[in-house]
Each structure stands twice: as structure tokens, then as C-alpha cells.
Image: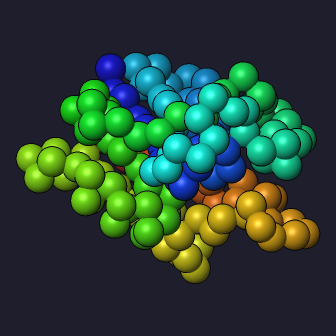
Amino acid sequence: MVKVLFVCTGNICRSPSAEGVFRALLKAEGVTGVETDSAGTHGYHIGEPPDPRSCQAALARGVDLRPLRARQVEARDFRDFDLVVAMDRGHLAHLEKLCPAAERHRLALFMTFAPGHGTRDVPDPYYGAGDGFERVLDLIEAGSRGLIAHLRERLG
């Protein structure tokens, strides 16, 4: 069993979208032995569902985020998860400060699994307008496919 945690700021837009899309792609591709969760670097929205705009955009692609609830990263996450995936470089820097040195090998930047997409960060759509949530889902689908390929290699 491999455990993957996706992390953004408040755990209501990017990281729950990544969790939902990644789970859906795992199922669609018949990949088993992977457990997922998501969390935020900050506790702004603990217990809340994902942003309605994230839910609407994901649902249009067949992914239901509505059952998910926000939580904050906890110290135990760095030992309980094999991979703690930051949605942007700011999240990664925050996680590096929280993470014990012996566990830093578990940290990764999400878009490293999708090179060639012109960005190292999944942008925060929360304050934006227009197609920001669609753009985030496009990047998350690409990153998720790359992460699945990475895990397939790792799992043999």
C-alpha cells in the first residue's frame, strides 16, 4: 500500500481536486494499492467541503468532491504518508519547515510529475474569475497521470 497526501493552503480548492481526480484516474486505470487524502497548510476551513466552484468544475468531469472535508496537515502525516505532494512551491516551502529532516524525502512538488506544461505551480483559483478552476483541473489531470506512471514504476 502506498499512501499519497495532496496539500494546498486551505484544502478547499487544489488539494481536494487533486485527491478526487487522482482517485478517479486510479480507478479508471485499474491501479490498486494506493490510498489518498488531502490537507491544507493552514486551518482556515477545517471541516468544510471543497469550494462549490471546485465541486462544480470537477463534477462536470465526472468527479464528485462533495464528500471531502478540509483538514490541516498534522505532524503524523510526514510518517503516515509515503508521498506528501505540494500543489505549489509555497506549500512545499511550508511543508519543508514542518517536516522532520529524516522524512523530507517524502515531499514532492505536484507539477514535477507533469513536466512540459509551462508551470511548476498549480495556480490558486480561489480569488480568480473565468476558467481558473478548469485550468487547475487540466493541470491536475496531467500531474495525476504522471504521478500514476511514477507509482507504477515504484510499485513494479
Q: In this view, does 63 lie to the left or right of 152?
A: right
Q: In which quarter of the image is the C terminus?
A: top left
Residue at screen point 67% across, 44% down: 12
Q: Which of 87 and 24 is in front in this view?
A: 87
Vertical comparison of 142 with 60: above or below: below
In the displayed orientation, state which residue is furthest to the front.
44
Residue 21 locus on image (x, y percent): 65, 39
Q: In this view, does 135 lie to the left or right of 18?
A: right
Residue 22 seen by the camera: no
Residue 5 locus on image (x, y percent): 43, 38
Residue 17 locus on image (x, y percent): 66, 44
Residue at screen point 80% across, 70% down: 128
Q: Is residue 60 left or right of residue 43?
A: right
Residue 65 locus on image (x, y percent): 73, 32
Q: In this view, does 15 lie to the left or right of 120?
A: right
Q: How many labels does the image show?
A: 0
Residue at screen point 81% across, 59% down: 134
Vertical comparison of 35 with 39: above or below: above
Vertical comparison of 32 with 82: above or below: above
